[in-house]
């Protein structure tokens, strides 16, 4: 039985049955799928979190809106003050809608062989950032960087409007997830990405936005473009 007490867990990690642990300084390398019989989320526990812990979990809520639910994304933009103030209705809304999105995806692809890949939006770069920073950058802040990088890559490939990149970056900034980052070596980030479990046939797999609320998965992203965007966004 799962009783998650952080926003990161209530909105994301307590759903889906993944039990992986880090190994060899790499993220989530060893684990299994093991579904709980029951998950209970009491949003009152979120009021005990620090501002940083709350915003860390909010990253995954924003991700769910970005990949699957434009109305959830709109809701977060319009109610961010209430969310960060731990308003009961706002917390219940974002947790419920996030859980609904993740559960629907996992029910269709429990073992992460197809559709579930979309839940990795921002995580290709995000996990590399965590690794190269020696896990000094939190998961939410690392994934926020990854989401912005992926959005900018999609824009430069002519697939995403610039206004969507701006909306995403502004919301993540207002949520306290973007700011001055540690200096991270781009070559080390690329190396870490090549050791990620999302590698397919030696190619790095990215989840890219088409628009807010819709993504697609591809392994056809030029590494030089990735390096260029990393250099700009870090």
Image (tube, helix red, strand yellow):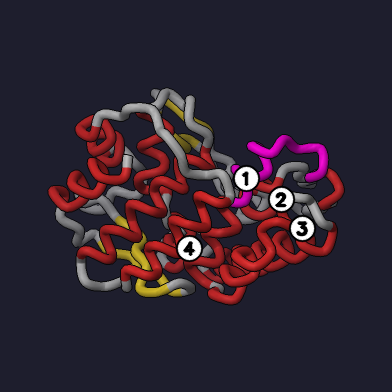
Which sits earlier in the primary sequence, circle 3 or circle 4? 3
Instruction: Identify the residue shown where x is 35% and y is 45%.
Output: 125
Residue occupied by mark 4: 116
Residue 190 visible (yes or no): yes
Specify the segment rendered in magenta: 46-58
| Foreground disc of the pair 4, 1 | 1
Which sits earlier in the primary sequence, circle 2 or circle 3? 2
Marks 3 and 4, how far apart in space?
A: 25 Å
**Exactly how many numbered labels are in the figure?**
4
Label placed on residue 68 = none
Q: Please identify the quadrant where the C terminus is shown.
A: top left
Marks 2 and 3, how far apart in space?
A: 9 Å
Residue occupied by mark 2: 84
**Image location of residue 64, percent across then percent down:** 55, 63
Q: Callout 2: few (<14), some (14-19), or many (20+) C-alpha neighbours within 10 Å?
A: some
| Foreground disc of the pair 1, 2 | 2
**Residue 165, above or below 192:** below
**Residue 43, above or below 54:** below
């Amino acid at each position: 039985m799962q009783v998650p007490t952080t926003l990161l867990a209530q909105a994301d990690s307590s759903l889906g049955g993944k039990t992986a642990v880090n190994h060899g300084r790499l993220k989530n390398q060893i684990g299994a799928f093991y579904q709980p019989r029951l998950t209970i989320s009491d949003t009152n526990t979120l009021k005990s979190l620090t501002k940083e812990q709350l915003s860390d979990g909010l990253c995954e809520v924003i991700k769910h809106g970005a990949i699957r639910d434009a109305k959830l994304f709109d809701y977060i933009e319009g109610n961010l003050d209430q969310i960060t103030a731990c308003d009961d209705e706002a917390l219940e809304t974002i947790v419920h809608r996030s859980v609904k999105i993740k559960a629907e995806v996992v029910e269709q692809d429990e073992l992460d062989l197809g559709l579930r890949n979309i839940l990795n939006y921002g995580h290709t770069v995000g996990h590399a950032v965590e690794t190269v920073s020696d896990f000094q950058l939190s998961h939410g802040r690392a994934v926020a960087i990854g989401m912005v990088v992926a959005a900018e890559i999609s824009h430069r490939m002519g697939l995403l409007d610039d206004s969507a990149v701006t909306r995403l970056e502004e919301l993540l900034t207002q949520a306290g997830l973007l700011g001055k980052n540690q200096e991270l070596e781009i070559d080390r980030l690329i190396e870490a990405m090549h050791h990620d479990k999302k590698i397919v046939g030696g190619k790095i797999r990215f989840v890219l936005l088409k628009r807010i609320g819709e993504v697609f998965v591809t392994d056809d992203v030029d590494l030089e473009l990735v390096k260029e965007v990393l250099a700009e966004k870090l």
